[in-house]
Amino acid sequence: MNVSDLRVALVSGNYNMVRDGPTQALGRLVRHLLDEGAEVRVFCPTVEHPQVDQPGEIVSLPSFAIPGRGEYRIPLGLIGAAKRAFAAFGPNVVHVASPDRAARQAARWAREHGVPVLASVHTRFETYPQYYGVGFMEPVVEAWLRRLYRRCDALVAPSDGMVDVLRRQRMHDDIGIWSRGVDRSVFHAGARDLSLRRSLGITDGDVAIGFLGRVVMEKGLPEFADTLAELARRGVPHKVMVLGDGPARDWLAERVPEARFAGYQTSPALGHWVAGMDIFFNPSITETFGNVTLEAMACGVPVVAARATGSTTLVADGETGTLVSPGDIAGFADALQRYAEDAALRRAHGAAGEALSKTFDWDTINRQMAQTYLRLLEARRL
């Protein structure tokens, strides 16, 4: 079989809503498959004004907004007109990209019809409870995820570190890598334009520590805020630049009063904003890859990150940035202080990060994904 023989049903809880790592990766994959002649249908919740312009034919799933997180919607399931459209399409591969009810129904349909199911893992949902005061629920969430993943033919994760986590959690035996790329027309060192950050009151001589992503607690905001408070206590001169928006914006503004908020940005301006950082700080442990980390590296910005899934694959400790044990506030502050006080170190690690980012190529990555689909189809035929 060839890629042009594929009929892929992609079921996702977040394909056509906000701009984030999963939506970017899935959109790139769909575009690649379509360009190679495959047929693709995307079954997902939709919103009236999505932040992204996604490729492919989209079948809207009935859904409801997440309380307090209206930018996201939860599908009620693969039901009604969507269920009929799914059956009429008759996929020969089902790809589920979220562990919700619609994905579980799609996986059940696939098993009943002898169609292989691939699940892609995009975030560490089991880590979320600790950021909302219900950490005791983590084993329950793990078990809930395992019930879906063990019923799939294979899993893919974006980093070696995440593959190791999934194996330890006994999610599956067949786990491959679906890595991530970066848009080099947007994210590159030449995009550095200090005029944008000047609009926030950050001068050319200031050291700007940057945050990029959704402003939500699970992105490590408590660690981010505590670390910046420690830097202030030490008297280390710096400015804080936040790119993104979210429900925890007011919380972060109160905890980090020196933060300057640029809000949600889109390409190509986003690349100029990121390249205008001097240090990128990512204390999150919830990413499976960390697209924002790769985007900062591509812009020649050194990274301080938690030694966690995703970052351990991207950041070469002591060469392109610094990895710190999760939650180690003093360690994060030490790393940021070193960069803040040593411009030569920032330049050296930033340049090394940009060079390393060039090994992450979207075309190569998505060709490998298409081959994974074909491998699973061939295994079904044997």
Image (cartoon, rainbow, N blue to C red):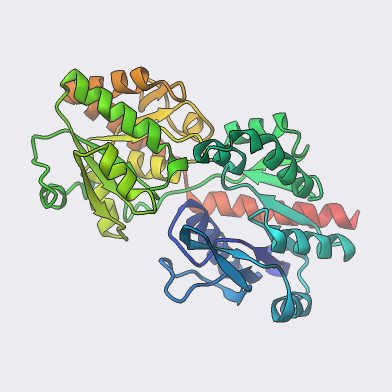
Q: Nearer the viewer, residue 16 or 126?
A: 126
Please state the horizontal and vertical placement of residue 327, each as a whole percent of the image.
44, 24
- Number of numbered tags placed on the structure image: 0
In the figure, 338 relative to 228: above or below? above
Quadrant for the N terminus, please.
bottom right
**115 lies left or right of 322:** right
Q: Residue at x 38, y 30 (%)?
A: 223
Q: Is residue 316 above or below residue 281?
A: above
Location of residue 146 in the rendering, given as x and y in whole percent from the top left corner: 75, 42
Q: Is residue 137 visible?
A: yes
Say which quarter of the image contains residue 352: top left
- Residue at image coords 51%, 71%: 55
Q: Image quadrant of residue 5?
A: bottom right
Q: Residue at x 44, y 45 (%)?
A: 291
Q: Is residue 272 above or below residue 330?
A: below
Q: Position of residue 250 (x, y in %)?
A: 30, 49
237 left or right of 144? left
Position in image of residue 134 (x %, y %)? 58, 38
Residue 189 visible within the image = no
Q: Residue 61 occupies which quadrant of the picture?
A: bottom right
Between residues 166 and 368, which one lies in front from this camera angle?
166
Left or right of residue 332, residue 109 in this image:
right
From this view, report whether residue 169 is shown above or below residue 86: above
